[in-house]
Image (cartoon, rainbow, N blue to C red):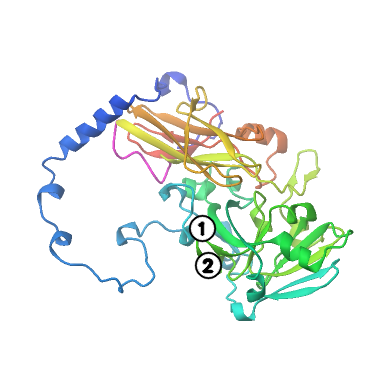
């Protein structure tokens, strides 16, 4: 379903729900009745093969993989988005995940020249430019520095970019799936730069990758010396090749294009480098003709992952758990509200699990669905007081000549059969 006019559907047709958080007694009652209905289920009464026969031994799967029944939980691409898959993107299946940590095999990919396959014994990191002592580090050298473990989200600046001009892609994997959140292990960028000795005139840092595109980005020295990391592991194991093995830059809360993968060089300078990628991309052309540039921070954002177009309501009426993710490059998420009627009424969601700066936050809202249609939205607020805007508010401020930094409120329409579609209402 889509609403190309942008007008709110007629209220008489919608029969707006009168809903709220259900009491624990009502929820318990729904679950008890579900168990009672299963009393004659063959899944309970009949013996299955797995009850009769022994399974594989401990050496059958030396590197564990998900169950065969979870084979559909994978990254997916949209072939028509780019001309060539080696310079393209695939998407994290947000609707299939729980908690805040993204498994390594499901973190979205964005490449400019495909995946570089690098022997770590042959990899080097060079520091040059406005430093007292140019240096070259091996991987072994880097691992002698004090290590840190930090959980951060990484979001591409173009995440949700196709939605600037209206509802386009039917699934939160496609509308919001250029984001993931992992625990990085590595060393502080500050420690490495201090080893070389940054000269007072050094106010910018060029980070360059070892892939065929020689991907490079300029980073203000203030940020580089604050919380940036040079990481060699994620979620307890070495970086995956598609995530920059053996070394990548971590720039917490800032655009994903700055998190240089296959990191090989750091050049200290006194101004940002005018690289082809920086002058042609990652700017927002405003209606006035001016362009927003160096929009580094990823703004406060959220999305409901269940129900969503790839995760419809299949259980029918009754107790329903709404789940979603919220994040902000400014720090932690302070509050998330959800609406079941397209923003007319808002209810406080429950944030559960760790609340870490510049990481994903998991939120829930439990309600009793009566089978009426829903227009689901979520709205996040971060610790700095920034509130997630509507898409119309963003368009009014920035126009439609961009695909970057779309943190507008997403709307999912749920019909009486539980089918969910990407829509826009205003």
Who comes first in sequence, dot 2 or dot 1?
1
Q: Which residue is mark 2?
A: 240
Residue 316 part of the magenta-drawn span: yes
- Where residue 336 appears, as percent x and y from the top left, is 53, 33
Q: In this rendering, is residue 127 above or below 378?
A: below
Q: Secondary structure at mark 1?
A: loop
Q: Are marks 2 and 1 in contact (CB under 8 Å)?
A: yes
Residue closer to the observer: 174 or 36: 36
Q: Nearer the viewer, residue 245 or 320?
A: 245
Which quadrant is home to the N terminus?
top left
Instruction: For label 2, count other residues whose C-alpha is less than 10 Å away and answer few (under 14), some (14-19) or many (20+).
Output: some
Which residue is pictured at 46% across the width and 46% down the height?
171
Q: Quadrant of residue 206?
A: bottom right
User: Is residue 348 inside the magenta stretch?
Assistant: no
Q: Residue at x 57, y 47 (%)?
A: 359
Q: Magenta residues: mostly which secondary structure?
A: loop
* Residue at mark 1: 107
Which image quadrant for residue 20? top left
- Residue at 74 percent across and 52 percent down: it is 223
Q: Residue 119: percent from the left, percent from the top?
A: 59, 79
CA gap, disc 2 and disc 1: 10 Å
Task: Please state which of residues 199 and 122 is positioned toward the viewer in this rendering.
Answer: 199
């Amino acid at each position: 379903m889509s609403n190309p006019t942008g007008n709110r559907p007629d209220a008489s047709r919608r029969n707006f729900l009168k809903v709220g958080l259900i009491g624990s007694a009502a929820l318990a009652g729904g679950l008890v009745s579900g168990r009672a209905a299963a009393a004659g289920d063959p899944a309970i009464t009949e013996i299955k093969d797995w009850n009769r026969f022994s399974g594989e031994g401990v050496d059958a799967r030396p590197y564990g993989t998900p169950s065969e029944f979870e084979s559909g939980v994978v990254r997916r691409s949209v072939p028509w988005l780019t001309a060539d898959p080696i310079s393209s993107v695939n998407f994290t299946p947000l609707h299939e995940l729980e908690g805040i940590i993204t498994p390594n095999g499901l973190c979205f990919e964005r490449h400019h020249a495909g995946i570089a396959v690098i022997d770590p014994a042959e990899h080097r990191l060079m520091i040059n430019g406005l430093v007292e002592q140019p240096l070259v580090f091996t991987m072994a050298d880097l691992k002698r520095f004090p290590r840190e473990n930090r959980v951060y989200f990484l979001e591409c600046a173009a995440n949700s970019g196709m939605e600037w001009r209206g509802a386009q892609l039917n699934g939160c994997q496609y509308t919001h799936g250029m984001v993931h959140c992992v625990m990085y292990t590595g060393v502080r960028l500050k420690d490495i730069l201090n080893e070389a000795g940054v000269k007072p005139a050094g106010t910018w840092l060029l980070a360059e990758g070892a892939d065929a595109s020689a991907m490079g980005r300029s980073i203000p020295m203030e940020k580089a010396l604050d919380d940036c990391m040079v990481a060699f592991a994620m979620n307890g194991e070495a970086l995956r090749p598609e995530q920059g093995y053996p070394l990548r830059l971590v720039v917490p809360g800032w655009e994903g294009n700055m998190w240089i993968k296959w990191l090989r060089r750091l050049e200290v300078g006194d101004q940002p480098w005018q690289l082809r990628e920086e002058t042609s991309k990652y700017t927002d052309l405003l209606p006035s003709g001016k362009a927003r540039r160096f929009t580094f921070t990823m703004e406060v954002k959220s999305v409901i992952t269940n129900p969503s177009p790839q995760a419809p309501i299949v259980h029918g009426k009754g107790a329903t758990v709404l789940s979603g993710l919220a994040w902000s490059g400014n720090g932690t998420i302070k509050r998330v509200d959800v609406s079941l009627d397209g923003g007319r009424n808002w209810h406080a969601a429950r944030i559960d699990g760790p609340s870490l700066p510049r990481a994903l936050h998991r939120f829930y809202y439990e309600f009793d669905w009566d089978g009426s249609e829903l227009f689901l939205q979520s709205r996040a607020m971060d610790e700095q007081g920034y509130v997630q805007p509507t898409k119309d508010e963003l368009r009014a401020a920035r126009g439609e000549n961009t695909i970057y930094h779309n943190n507008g409120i997403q709307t999912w329409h749920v019909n009486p059969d539980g089918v969910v579609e990407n829509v826009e209402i205003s």
